[in-house]
Image (cartoon, rainbow, N blue to C red):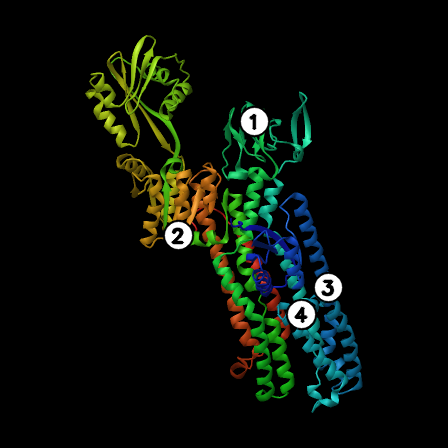
Amino acid sequence: MAVQNQTMNIAVGGLKCASCVKTVEGALENSPGIQAASLNLVSGVARIEYLPEIVDFEFVQEILESNGYKASKSEGATESVLQNQASEQQSEYSALMRKFWFAAAVSIPVMIFSYPDFIPVLRDWMPMGSMNRRIVWGILGLLTLPVLLWAGSQFYTGTWSALKHRTANMHTLIAAGITAAFVYSAIAVMFPQWFPNQALAEAFWDVSTVVVALVVLGMALEVKAKGKTSEAIEKLVGMQPRTARVVREGKGVDLPVEEVIAGDIVIVRPGEKIPVDGVVIKGSSSVDESMITGESIPVEKLEDDELIGATLNKTGSFTLRATKIGKDSVLSNIIRMVQDAQGSKAPIQRVVDQVAAYFVPAVIILGLLAFIAWYNIGPEPRIVYATIVLVTTLIIACPCALGLATPTSLTVGIGKGAEHGVLIRSGDALQTAKQLTAIVLDKTGTVTKGEPELTDIVPAGTFTEVELLRLAASLEKGSEHPLGEAIVSGAASRGLALEEAAHFNAIPGHGVSGEVDGRTVLLGNKKLLEDWSIDSSGLDDKWAELASQGKTPMYVSVDDRLAGIISVADTIKEDSTTSIRELQDMGLVVIMLTGDNQRTAAAIASQVGINRVLSEVLPQEKAHEVRKLQLEGHVVAMVGDGINDAPALAQADVGLAIGTGTDVAIEASDITLISGSLAGVVTAMKVSRATMRNVHQNLFGAFIYNTLGVPVAMGFLYPFFGILLSPLIAAAAMAFSSVTVVTNANRLRYFKLAGVER
């Protein structure tokens, strides 16, 4: 028997830029027993699919460390773990800022004394070729050295690590650039006689110090901005209550929520968070589930109703029996799903990673070619111009912006969806959702509530509505049929006292009969009345009218006389009509899929504004219908909630499961809508479109930056306009390109769901 693949998440340390992603993934995927590896640059977590008989954590750790990266087990998102991560981020930020301030402080005198010819006093005191100038520049070189070795130490350690494994990264470019500037300056100061004239013996200490300062500042700001992308996870974790009032030995005892076990009886008072998942066993209340579902209206909870941990009890007191705790709770599962999704990649990111892997070596080659070209055919002083071009090209070409463009947006966008009760499983699903052209809605439980309700009471003759309903409900009191339960619930909601029915008899395909208060009562279809020779013609038109509305009308007779009609229907969810309209406004073709007959299906569809209906579809045919739509050229989403929807959800390009549905449907889906509302579908579409728009903005900016920046740095504009980019400007542009990408991604945190997003 083949051993099933397993997955593990590994926190990877020592990542420098996008080129590191390809290095790590390649090292892992080329190792025996590892089937696939995906590394997220933002979170630093690698998701590895492996064969357990060959691979374990120690095996993966050895691979990563041999390639110059640290490895540790990625723990789930708990409050302590997040606090540690926040502390580490703050420490990294503080360390980088100390380096920045030191480099900036040194850069000020270095820049002043590097250009004495622009300051009359200094020009007279340290003229070109003088010993004073050489001495001052020598001192500047000594000041520059600690900037390179301390403030810029990460560039050299990163370069060395990459070189040991025959790769190159962002740090390679920076280290080569600042070192080239430093070495040229040192030679110019110590050996000016090597140069044909004094004008060539220029020092570029300021290039080294200012570049280090700007790049380190950019790294610090990037660390700060990347920390904000995990805000959604932090919010979810922060929802978890810390204590629970548990009944132990007949008394309520406050315990840490971690000590609650399944089966414990927990007391919840007004205004408290519900500590664990459970079922109401006594009392009632209204519960605010907005932090989980995104729905702002409190939900009434009665005995036997299910409760979600971390939601807020509003009014009443009740006791619950704990059912799911710890990692099995709804909130823990949500957190885990969001983490996994944030660590996934969209298809577009895989292309970007491939490009980034070859980007750094290509830039080094271009920089050397530019140096050679300027040294051979450039204007005098050629060596100076050639050096400036080399340094500028190496510094400006940072692949970080390219590597961060997609994962930062995905992280924030998926987190934003979770805040509104939409759990997106992967970057694939998010990207595909943006491309949808058609959306198929299962009727029962999706468009409708999936629970029949009493809708119409039509008495005949001398019968009243109350009498008719009381007799029918009393007859159905002992029935387990969903239609009968709907009639009984309708009578109960009106406060009617029901009687026990005698001689109850269920007649398959016809209805039920029995005696209530000594009177013979029939409830069923026209065939049932015909069998009892009861004339129904007086209400046949009304029956047909109700049936045309998608309802299930049933005749009632009492003592062989037509007493009226009682109608039951699977009613439409409150927000189905508005949600469907919004989806259509987005340009999506909305299709309803149902096993109901054509007349009932058409009636429901017309009420919610759906023009295309697939009716009388057997459960096993649903996936086939989705496939037919795909063959028509549609990119199809399927929305469903039942076991029989699972094949169709899996067949669709994107499967969306109603969270109130079955676990099977949820497992087969790409997106889970916790609220059970079609409004969640609208939210998913809007989040997808907003996120992918943000991704495209980031990628456009990153590609434009590198496409324009590298040629300008190489001096392509100099022959036409006399423009040659300064290494200092290159450093500033490089540093802030990454910050711009991350900042743009963080704009999604303020994304509003009002209106239609295109």
* Mark 3 vs mark 4, CA separation in Å: 26 Å
Query: Crowding near pointer 2: few (<14 within 10 Å), some, many (20+)?
Result: some
Q: Amino acid at mark 4?
A: Lys
Residue lying at 55% horizontally and 51% vertically, measured from the top left: 342
Single out the residue that lies furthest toward the front.
1
Residue matched to label 2: 436
Q: Nearer the viewer, residue 406 or 587?
A: 406
Given contact means CB atoms under 8 Å apart, are the residues at marks 4 and 2 in contact?
no
User: Which badge, 3 or 1, comes first in the chain's sequence?
Assistant: 3
Query: Crowding near pointer 4: few (<14 within 10 Å), some, many (20+)?
Result: few
- Quarter of the figure with residue 556: top left
Residue matched to label 4: 164
Residue 315: mark:
1
Task: Name the spot of residue 325 as percent of width and height, x first.
Answer: 60, 35
Task: Name the spot of residue 384 as percent of width and height, x first.
Answer: 65, 84
Q: Nearer the viewer, mark 2 or mark 1?
A: 2
Q: Amino acid at mark 1?
A: Thr
- Quarter of the figure with residue 669: top left
Given contact means CB atoms under 8 Å apart, are the residues at marks 2 and 3 in contact?
no
Query: Crowding near pointer 3: few (<14 within 10 Å), some, many (20+)?
Result: many
Q: Amino acid at mark 2?
A: Leu
Say if 624 sits above or below 325 in the image. below
Q: Nearer the viewer, mark 4 or mark 2?
A: 4
User: Which badge, 1 or 4, comes first in the chain's sequence?
Assistant: 4
* Mark 2 vs mark 1, CA separation in Å: 42 Å
Say if 351 sits above or below 321 in the image. below
Q: Nearer the viewer, mark 3 or mark 4?
A: 4
Q: Amino acid at mark 3?
A: Lys
